[in-house]
Image (cartoon, helix red, strand yellow):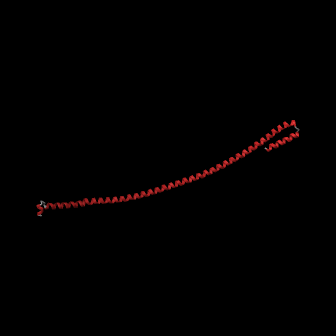
């Protein structure tokens, strides 16, 4: 103790300060350090829970995104299939319409040919009849003055046969 006195240290004051420091440590430990550590531990636990929840939400978002992408892919496939079906149906419908138009055109063409043939025959018949009448009148006028009626008739018949042959 003498050494402490020689150094200028009062041992009673040192003991009192040590006791005060111990009380301060006890009070700080009890009322400040433990609650602060408790609060920090609660925050650490809450942060871990939030990280866990965040990871779960990210997983759910990933699953939802995958489901969305699958849904979009299915919708695209379905749309492509619908368009392909519609295109095929349209092509078939176009082909059937074209076939019907070809048939109708063929019928119209055949009817026109038949009508033309009839009109041509009618025209030729009328032309033949008219020619016969003109030739007969011409032959009668020419040969009545020159030949007898029997020869005139023979010439008329021969002229009619020639006209028939044409």
Residue occupying the point 72% across, 44% down: 116
The answer to whether residue 150 is left or right of residue 79 is right
Q: Position of residue 56 (x, y in %)?
A: 39, 59
Q: Position of residue 30 (x, y in %)?
A: 24, 61
Q: Can you name the residue that lies furthest to the top here?
A: 145
Residue occupying the point 76% across, 42% down: 124
The quadrant holding residue 19 is: bottom left
Image quadrant in which the C terminus is located:
top right
The quadrant holding residue 32 is: bottom left
The answer to whether residue 56 is left or right of residue 4 is right
The answer to whether residue 39 is left or right of residue 120 is left
Q: Position of residue 125 (x, y in %)?
A: 78, 43
Residue occupying the point 36% across, 58% down: 51
Image quadrant in which the N terminus is located:
bottom left
Q: Can you name the residue that lies furthest to the bottom here?
A: 1
**Residue in front for this viewpoint, 75 or 24:** 75
């Amino acid at each position: 103790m003498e050494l402490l006195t020689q150094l200028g240290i009062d041992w009673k004051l040192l003991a009192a300060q040590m006791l005060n420091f111990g009380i301060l440590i006890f009070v700080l430990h009890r009322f400040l350090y433990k609650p602060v550590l408790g609060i920090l531990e609660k925050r650490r636990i809450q942060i871990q829970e939030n990280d866990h929840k965040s990871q779960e939400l990210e997983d759910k978002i990933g699953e939802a995104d995958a489901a969305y992408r699958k849904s979009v892919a299915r919708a695209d496939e379905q749309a492509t299939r619908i368009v392909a079906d519609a295109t095929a149906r349209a092509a078939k419908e176009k082909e059937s319409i074209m076939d019907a138009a070809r048939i109708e055109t063929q019928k119209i063409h055949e009817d026109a040919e038949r009508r033309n043939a009839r009109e041509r025959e009618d025209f030729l018949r009328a032309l033949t009849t008219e020619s016969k009448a003109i030739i007969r009148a011409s032959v009668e006028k020419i040969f009545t003055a020159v030949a007898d009626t029997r020869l005139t008739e023979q010439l008329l018949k021969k002229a009619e046969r020639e006209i028939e042959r044409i």
